[in-house]
Image (cartoon, helix red, strand yellow):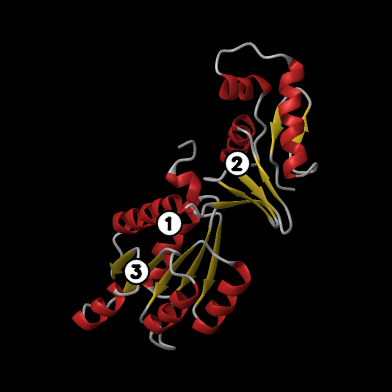
Amino acid sequence: MNLSLKKILKQLDVLFISELDSSYKKIETILNIFFKNILYTNSLNYAKNMYEKSFPNIIIIDINLNESFGINFIKELRKKNKSIPIIIVTENKEVGVLIDAIKLNLTDYLLKPIDINKLVYALNLSAKEILNSGEIKITIKNNIKYNYLEKAVITSNTRFILTKNESRLLELFLSNKNKFIQNEEIIKHIWSDKEVSSSAFKSLINRLTNKIGKDLISNSFGIGYGIIEK
C-alpha cells in the first residue's frame, strides 16, 4: 500500500459531533493532526444537514449530547449508510447502552475521559475499514475524486481508469500535496533505476493531466511538479 493509514486519513473529512466540554479540545487536537477537514457541530439537526451536504468519511459522536440521545441519530444514519465508520464517545457505562451501540456496527466505543492512544487506535481502525471496503475516495479538488482501490479518477459525469504508472504518479502527488517534487524523484519513484527519456516522462505527466484536469498539476521550472492548492 503506497499510502499509509495516516496519509489516508489526511485526505479525508471527519464529522465531529460533541458538546464543548473538556473532552472536545483533546479530541479536536488529535483530529487536526490526522484529518484534512473537521466538520464540527454540537447540534444533531445541523449534523444531519452537514452529513447530507458534505458526505464526511468518518463520524465521531458524543452520544450524551444535551439535545437528544445520540444513539437515535446513529440508528437513522445506519438506514442510509451501513458502512461509514462511526466512533462514539460517552460517559455512560450502562449495559443497555452498550448493547444498543453494538447493534449499530460501530468502529469503536470510547469512554470519557478520553485516552489519546485509544482514540488514535480507533482512527486507524476507521482507515482500515475504509480501505477494506474499497470506498477510499480522496478529494483531488472540488468535485474531482480519486478512488484508491479502483485506481480511478471520478468527476460528476466522468470516470477515468488510470494506468499503473499514472496511479503511482497521482498517489505520489497526493501524498505530497502542496509540494513540488523534483523530476528526478518522480522518475525514481515510478521507474526505479531504469533509464527514462524526457519524452516518456513528459508523456506520463500529460496523460495524467488530461485525465484529472489541466489546471490541477502545477509545474515550477527547475523545481518540479505537484498538486498545489491555490
Question: Whole-Å distance between the Cαs marked 3 and 2?
Answer: 30 Å
User: For the residue marked with disc 3, what is the amino acid?
Assistant: Asn
Camera-side residue of 28 and 182: 182
Q: Which residue is mark 2?
A: 174
Q: Secondary structure at mark 2?
A: helix
Q: Which residue is mark 3?
A: 105
Q: Residues within 10 Å of mark 3 (few under 14, many from 20)?
A: some
User: For the residue marked with disc 1, what is the amino acid?
Assistant: Ile
Is residue 32 left or right of 114 when viewed as pictured? right
Residue 46 pos. (x, y %) = 56, 80
Mark 3 and mark 2 lie on one chain; the one further toward the N terminus is 3
- Label annotation for residue 30: 1
Residue 92 visible somewhere in the drawing: no
Image position of 135 with respect to 99: above or below: above
Is residue 113 left or right of 22 when viewed as pictured? left
Residue 90 visible somewhere in the drawing: yes
